[in-house]
Amino acid sequence: MSERALPLAGVKVVELGQLIAGPFAGTLLAYFGAEVIKVEPPGGDPIRGWRKLDDSGTSFWWRSIGRNKRSVTLDLKSDAGRDLAARLIDGADVLIENFRPGTLENWGLGPDRFTDSNPGLIYTRISGYGQDGPYADKPGYASVCEGIGGLRYVNGFPGERPVRPNLSLGDTVAGLHAALGILLALFERRGSGQGQVVDVALYETVFNLLEAVIPEFDGAGLIREPAGSTVTGIVPTNTYRCADGKYVIIGGNGDSIFKRLMTTAGRADLAGDPRLAHNAGRVEHEAEVDGAIEAWCATLDSAEVLRRLEEARVPCGPIYSAADMMTDLHFQARGLFQQVEINGKPLKIPAMAPRLAGTPGGTRWPGGEAGGHTEAVLREELGLSEDEFQRLKDEGVFGQVN
């Protein structure tokens, strides 16, 4: 049986985005076979210097988000740099950019520039608030967009400061939506032959996560408030402290599951209580239900709580740190850690979902050095001669090229 090609083999992507949202979309596409040419400013994407750095002074994060990409450094503030970028885009299927709206137009690289030269181009734009509307010109980082998009309002404990997870969630969610939009546009192009602009706004992708928040307000005047470690209107689903000081998550909100949970917790009286037979009744008596579960958990170590609940087929689990995940046999069996080599040293980076049975994605190489592929890409893709490349290099268009 011949080996099947990766799903996005043959798709050529130029990534102009920096930091998280645009590059995360590019990483997803590259993981499943797209050829991604990452155009960085001289000196590289700023994310190379964010958070914990390795011995070479490069972010560990970069090794993951820069994987499978070929890095080209271009000074887009120069005429020569913009011309080279335009020529790369002319030969691409997809462009990904996440500059402030209007930036690429000011550089002569807006969508209209490619209407005739590359009519099939999927021109993907990621910004805080979208390409139009009264907020389009506002700077929109993930933290801000998570707030206006509604996520921060429902996150946290009543009466306390809204909280965020220690992640750039708005950026990665936007990257996921961008990748989806690209795939939809590529699918449509198979019939029409035409490209289109994919407009992704961070606040809108967060807004997309809000479930019933909007219809509940419009239909019943209900504003969903923060609910700590619970979810409003679903009982029981919460986080409980055990005798060893560790927390476990228990989801016992199915009617039959609730009965098994309460029986396991030694509360057969609540398991058979007609008031609690269905979710609506349990919501009405949430404090009583949660109090009973909390009291039971407090008598046992977390491992014993989980053992008993798993035996009773009640959804439950621990709260894992990176160390816990790395040693978990299930994570290992599912292949969630891929080992790469950085300057002779092994490094594990996360695999990416979804998992495809016939054409799984993978990490072919980790994020490399800034501009490491500049000469190869420009000579292969644009046919630059050695003399032309050297002249542009001497002019500083590429910065320092390895």
Image (tube, rainbow, N blue to C red):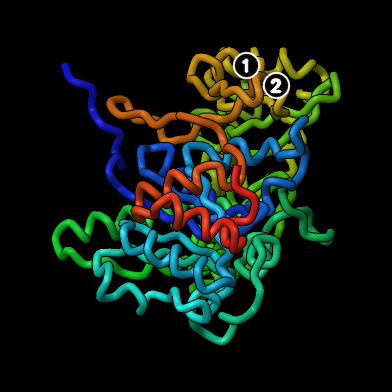
The answer to whether 88 appears left or right of 349 in the picture is: left
Most extreme residue toward the left is 191
Figure quadrant of residue 229? top right
Residue type at tag 2: Asp
Residue 320 lies, in percent from the top left, at 69, 27
Q: Residue 169's x, y, as percent?
A: 62, 51
Task: Provide residue 248's location: percent of width, then percent of height.
Answer: 71, 28
Q: Quadrant of the N terminus?
A: top left
- Side of 119 relative to 346 (left or right): left
Kind of residue sitting beneath label 1: Asp
Q: Which residue is drawn at 31% across and 25% down?
A: 357
In the drawing, what numbered circle is on residue 367? none
Q: Would you say 315 lies left or right of 47 here?
A: left
Q: Please give the label number shown on residue 324.
A: 2
Q: Are marks 2 and 1 in contact (CB under 8 Å)?
A: yes
Q: Can residue 326 be seen in this view?
A: yes
Tell me the SS state at disc 1.
loop
Quadrant of the frame with the C terminus: top right
Q: Is mark 2 on a helix, strand or loop?
A: helix
Q: Residue at 72% across / 13% down in the picture?
A: 304
Crowding at label 2, few (<14), some or many (≥20) Cα neighbours within 10 Å? Answer: few
Please state which of residues 87 and 323 is positioned toward the viewer in this rendering: 87
Front residue of 400 and 249: 400
Q: Disc number at residue 328?
A: 1
* Residue drawn at 50 percent across, 30 percent down: 365
- The x and y percentages for residue 58 are 71, 39
> Viewer-proximal residue, 24 or 262?
24
Instruction: Name which residue lies at 42% across and 55% down.
Output: 14
Q: Mark 2 and mark 1: span between their CA atoms? A: 6 Å
Looking at the image, is 317 positioned above or below residue 101? above
The picture quadrant where one finds residue 282 is top right
